[in-house]
Amino acid sequence: MTPILWMAAALIGAATLIARLAPLLWRGRDQEDTATPGWLSALGPCLLTAMGVAVLLPEALGAWETGQGAALLGGTGAAALAMVVRRDPGLAALAGVVGWWVASAL
């Protein structure tokens, strides 16, 4: 791996750690009844979404440029449908791969 990839992995790990520890540190030991602010509860999912977009967007743009847009839509649609039906990320990943394969074969 290049040094840039190592730095990106370290930054993603640090951001994930901060997102996981922030709610625990926010409350403190003396204020156990204090409610967590709404923005702090949304911080973790927002960071994970931002990282996912940063990873997937270049791949999606590359798929459109190489003429594999239908395969991209087929895989994304199959994964989204699997998540709506079962709420199982493993099944959604498998459905996305199968959807990509079927749509690229058409």
Image (spheres, rainbow, N blue to C red):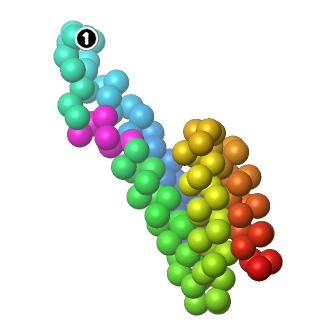
Please count the marks in the image. Answer: 1
Please name the residue shown 22% across and 11% down the image: 33
Say whether residue 8 is left or right of residue 100: left
Say whether residue 83 is left or right of residue 98: left
Quadrant of res 87? top right
Quadrant of res 96? bottom right
Disc 1 marks which residue?
A: 32
Please name the residue shown 24% across and 26% down the image: 36
Give the image location of residue 103, x and y in percent.
72, 73
In this picture, is 54 found above or below 13?
Answer: below
Please name the residue shown 53% across and 81% down the image: 61
What amino acid is found at the position of numbered circle 1 in the picture? Glu
Give the image location of residue 97, x and y in percent.
73, 61
Residue 83 shows in this picture: yes
Identify the magenta region: 39-44
Give the image location of residue 39, x and y in percent.
23, 40
Quarter of the image that includes the C terminus: bottom right
Q: Secondary structure at mark 1?
A: loop
Give the image location of residue 84, x and y in percent.
54, 45
Residue 3 shows in this picture: no
Please name the residue shown 65% across and 65% down the image: 75
Q: Nearer the viewer, residue 17 or 101?
A: 101
In this picture, is 62 found above or below 10?
Answer: below
Within-10-Å neighbours for mark 1: few <14, some 14–19, many 20+: few
Q: Magenta part mainly helix, strand or loop?
A: helix
Asked if residue 96 is among those painted magenta in the image, a careful observer would answer no
